[in-house]
Image (cartoon, rainbow, N blue to C red):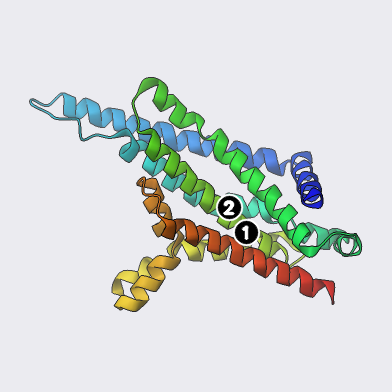
């Protein structure tokens, strides 16, 4: 465990030495703020319009459905671009800098290398998401959103981000070019995002498979406040599969 934490801490420090961490964090929070205040403005305009109507009933207007849900869905799309930017250097940089071989000759197991890289990426995305909690906090001060839905929605966003980190670590293990690693991760995560699009026109079996493989289907349930074992198993499985593939990729590189 000590080796894992050492590798993770080294990677986290290297992120903050370069501008990438600050650019990613600032960009993500600015986009989150832009989405939030636009959605909140739309919600307030709807309330004003319906309140001005005679015998209007505005109780159906809900902060979670009108603001938090769309905000989280928008941020899940932003993660498609942001996470590959965070993970692209994790192992690709080691290859390019010639320190890959040093990792292999050190008394550190491959599993510890992979776990350390994954932990660093996970810490970064969780920090990013935690900072975005300021927006629901604003609603708590001035409104009455449902805390359970906010909690499950942000849990879903964190699980999506962690799954994307595992994909990014995997693509970074395959190349020494950080741009190729980032683009490859973007392609895979985008496929996970849109794989259910042709499901409606497919047969029952194909529809069920495509729906289950889609990250958006499982994320949507968590945003709705439904914490189902099926969805948790999906995210855990995706993460575990790509970490296993990363382990095999690094192991094969060791013997070349």
Q: Please name the residue shown 37% across and 35% down the image.
A: 39
Which quadrant of the rendered structure holds the C terminus? bottom right
Are dots 1 and 2 in contact, CB under 8 Å?
yes
Q: Secondary structure at mark 2?
A: helix
Q: Please name the residue shown 12% across and 28% down the image.
A: 56
Q: Please name the residue shown 60% across and 42% down the image.
A: 126
**Residue nearest the observer in this picture, 63 or 237:** 237
CA distance separating discs 1 and 2: 7 Å
* 200 in relation to 28, above or below: below
Displayed quadrant of residue 197: bottom left
x then y, percent, for residue 178: 72, 59
> Is 226 displayed left or right of 193 in the figure?
left
- Sort mark 1 into few (<14), some (14-19) or many (20+) by Cα contacts within 10 Å: many
| Residue placed under numbered mark 1 in the picture | 166
Residue 162 - label: 2
**Residue nearest the observer in this picture, 227 or 130:** 227
- Sort mark 2 into few (<14), some (14-19) or many (20+) by Cα contacts within 10 Å: many
> Is 6 displayed left or right of 122 in the figure?
right
> Is 35 displayed left or right of 181 in the figure?
left
Q: Secondary structure at mark 1?
A: helix
User: Is residue 202 at all visible to an observer of this figure?
Assistant: no
x then y, percent, for residue 20: 70, 44
User: Is residue 77 at all visible to an observer of this figure?
Assistant: yes
x then y, percent, for residue 51: 17, 25
* 123 in relation to 190, above or below: above
x then y, percent, for residue 37: 42, 31
Q: Please name the residue shown 27% across and 29% down the image.
A: 45
């Amino acid at each position: 465990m000590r080796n894992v934490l050492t590798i993770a801490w080294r990677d986290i420090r290297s992120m903050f030495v370069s501008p990438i961490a600050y650019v990613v964090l600032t960009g993500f929070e600015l986009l989150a703020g832009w989405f939030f205040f636009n959605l909140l403005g739309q919600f307030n305009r709807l309330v004003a319009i319906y309140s001005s109507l005679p015998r209007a009933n505005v109780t159906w207007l809900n902060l979670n459905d009108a603001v938090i849900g769309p905000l989280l869905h928008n941020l899940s799309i932003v993660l498609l671009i942001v996470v590959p930017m965070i993970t692209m250097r994790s192992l690709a940089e080691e290859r390019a800098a010639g320190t890959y071989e040093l990792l292999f000759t050190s008394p550190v197991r491959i599993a510890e290398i992979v776990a350390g890289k994954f932990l660093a990426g996970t810490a970064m995305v969780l920090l990013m998401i935690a900072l975005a909690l300021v927006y629901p906090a604003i609603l708590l001060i001035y409104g009455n959103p449902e805390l359970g839905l906010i909690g499950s929605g942000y849990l879903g966003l964190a699980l999506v981000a962690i799954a994307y980190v595992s994909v990014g670590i995997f693509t970074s293990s395959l190349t020494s070019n950080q741009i190729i690693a980032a683009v490859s991760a973007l392609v895979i995560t985008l496929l996970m995002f849109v794989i259910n699009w042709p499901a409606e026109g497919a047969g029952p079996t194909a529809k069920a498979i495509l729906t289950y493989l889609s990250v958006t289907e499982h994320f949507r349930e968590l945003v709705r406040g439904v914490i189902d074992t099926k969805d948790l198993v999906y995210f855990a499985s995706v993460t575990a599969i790509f970490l296993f593939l990363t382990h095999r990729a690094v192991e094969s590189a060791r013997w070349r």
